[in-house]
């Protein structure tokens, strides 16, 4: 399950967003959405493939892959990203260790089930009394509930039979109330971080780089942010000849964000879903949205303005998705102007600089966005974070040179 939320009231601390309320989406549906979008963008997807070995030189990476039909093929690529989960073959082939700690977290069973005798308007919780907590959450848009049950000990086999037995032991329902077990899994929560996210031309992302309990439903969020951060940098290095050292900023920016999520998810997992924790579950603050993750301390974040925004928006922050007025007319939301793989320069209540290949420029003259940002030049990275906030175009030229996009005047 991907936990985007449950239609609850918006936290007063929530970041600016067009989607202020959270959604609850089954994992299988999330996977469909991602797959369809990948194919729409021209990508390819090969299931059942397995990495057998990889080697790398100063110029490329060679990987041998076993295919689902029993065949093997060798691929040579400029860079390789290991996003292959907690048991990452890529990470193991590089000899990169995962360092973590045992925080005494209980194992759990998670399953998608169909249950008769329960309404679908509420989460159903049997608190953490012997023999243990069990939760059944209706998954919107489906006939399924997601089951989550803490398990004492590290050994358990998740099958349709054992899932039905858990329901019978911990609830008022009989075993046959579970009419179907669509999917089930047993997991042991672990908190760990890879010693490094990069080794030469191979990089790690998602669970291959960091592991955490499912508390707060942060897994997909942090993985997508890894991919967005690394993706635009690979695009600059491969497609626009930015220096290879730009990729070093990936770990520098993402490791602190991952460490914060590891701590957050551990606290939420340990708190559980007891009725007395309802207030904590309802408003978890800005950090649980992961929209307030910033890179203010990054070498790629530069703020040279004499007068900064009255709201405190700085270089490194996620750009606020607000309406604005540009020289071309009104725009309902900033992110409509930011779509695509390019940098976008906003000249807010000041003259825009000369045109630069590979940079989109918009002259912003009014609207809520101007009140949030203040006056100045704002260079927005492809991942929608503010890379540069400046008063003078000369700072724009220098910044672009650092990321491989030189202005026409240099």
Image (cartoon, rainbow, N blue to C red):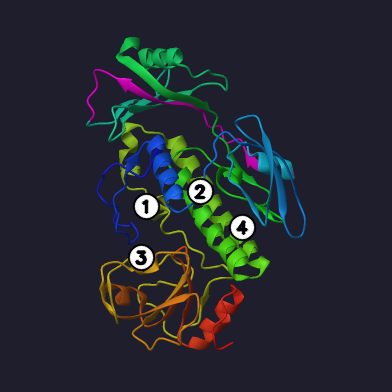
User: Viewer-proximal residue, 370 or 133?
Assistant: 370
Name the residue that disc number 2 marks. 223
Measuring from the top left, give residue 187's x and y in whole percent.
Answer: 53, 28
What SS does tag 3 mark? Answer: helix
Who's the residue at 68% across and 40% down the image? 73
Q: Callout 4 environment at 10 Å: few (<14), some (14 to 19), or many (20+)?
A: many
Measuring from the top left, give residue 186's x and y in whole percent.
Answer: 51, 25
Name the residue that disc number 4 marks. 251
User: Viewer-proximal residue, 190 or 275?
Assistant: 190
Compared with 21, 308 (above or below) is: below
Label count reads 4
Name the residue that disc number 3 marks. 335
User: Viewer-proximal residue, 189 or 318?
Assistant: 318
Q: Nearer the viewer, mark 1 or mark 2?
A: 2
Specify whether residue 279 is painted magenta: no
Name the residue that disc number 1 marks. 285
Going from the N terminus, do you reach mark 4 or mark 1 first? Answer: 4
Measuring from the top left, give residue 30's x and y in whole percent.
Answer: 40, 41
Residue 116's quadrant in the figure?
top left
Asked if the residues shown at circle 3 and circle 2 are in contact, with their CB atoms under 8 angstroms apart, the answer is no
Q: Nearer the viewer, mark 3 or mark 1?
A: 3
Residue extent of the magenta highlight = 95-120
Q: CA distance from mark 3 to mark 1?
A: 23 Å
Measuring from the top left, give residue 192's x and y in whole percent.
Answer: 61, 42
What SS does tag 4 mark? Answer: helix
Going from the N terminus, do you reach mark 3 or mark 1 first? Answer: 1
Q: CA distance from mark 4 to mark 2?
A: 13 Å
Q: Is residue 355 left or right of residue 330?
A: right
Going from the N terminus, do you reach mark 3 or mark 4 first? Answer: 4
Going from the N terminus, do you reach mark 1 or mark 2 first? Answer: 2
What SS does tag 2 mark? Answer: helix
């Amino acid at each position: 399950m991907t936990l985007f939320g449950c239609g609850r009231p918006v936290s007063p601390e929530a970041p600016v967003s067009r989607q202020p309320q959270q959604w609850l989406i089954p994992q299988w549906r999330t996977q469909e959405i991602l797959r369809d979008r990948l194919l729409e963008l021209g990508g390819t997807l090969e299931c059942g493939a397995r990495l057998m070995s990889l080697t790398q030189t100063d110029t490329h990476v060679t990987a041998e892959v076993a295919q689902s039909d029993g065949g093997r093929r060798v691929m040579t690529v400029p860079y390789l990203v290991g996003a292959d989960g907690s048991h990452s073959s890529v990470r193991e082939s590089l000899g990169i260790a995962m360092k973590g700690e045992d925080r005494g977290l209980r194992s759990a069973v998670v399953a998608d089930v169909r249950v008769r005798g329960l309404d679908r308007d509420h989460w159903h919780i049997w608190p953490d009394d012997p023999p243990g907590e069990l939760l059944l959450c209706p998954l919107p848009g489906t006939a399924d509930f997601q089951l989550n049950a803490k398990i004492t000990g590290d050994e358990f086999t998740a099958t349709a039979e054992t899932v039905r037995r858990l329901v019978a032991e911990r609830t008022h329902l009989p075993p046959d109330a579970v009419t179907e077990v669509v999917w089930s899994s047993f997991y042991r929560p672990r908190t760990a971080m890879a010693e490094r996210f990069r080794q030469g031309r191979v990089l790690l992302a998602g669970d291959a780089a960091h592991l955490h309990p499912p508390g707060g439903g942060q897994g997909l969020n942090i993985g997508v942010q890894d991919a967005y951060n690394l993706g635009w940098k690979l695009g600059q290095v491969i497609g626009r000849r930015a220096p290879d050292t730009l990729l070093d900023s990936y770990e520098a920016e993402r490791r602190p964000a991952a460490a914060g999520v590891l701590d957050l998810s551990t606290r939420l997992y340990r708190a559980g879903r007891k009725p007395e924790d309802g207030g904590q579950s309802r408003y978890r603050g800005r950090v649980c949205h992961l929209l307030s993750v910033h890179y203010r301390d990054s070498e790629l974040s530069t703020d040279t303005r004499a007068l900064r925004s009255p709201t405190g928006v700085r270089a490194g922050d996620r750009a606020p998705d607000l309406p604005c007025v540009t020289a071309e007319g009104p725009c309902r939301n900033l992110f409509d102007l930011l779509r695509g793989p390019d940098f976008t320069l906003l000249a807010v209540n000041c003259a825009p600089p000369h045109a630069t290949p590979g940079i989109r420029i918009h002259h912003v003259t009014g609207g809520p966005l101007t009140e949030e940002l203040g006056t100045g030049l704002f260079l927005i990275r492809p991942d929608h974070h503010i890379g540069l906030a400046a008063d003078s175009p000369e700072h724009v030229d220098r910044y672009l040179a650092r990321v491989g996009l030189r202005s026409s005047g240099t």
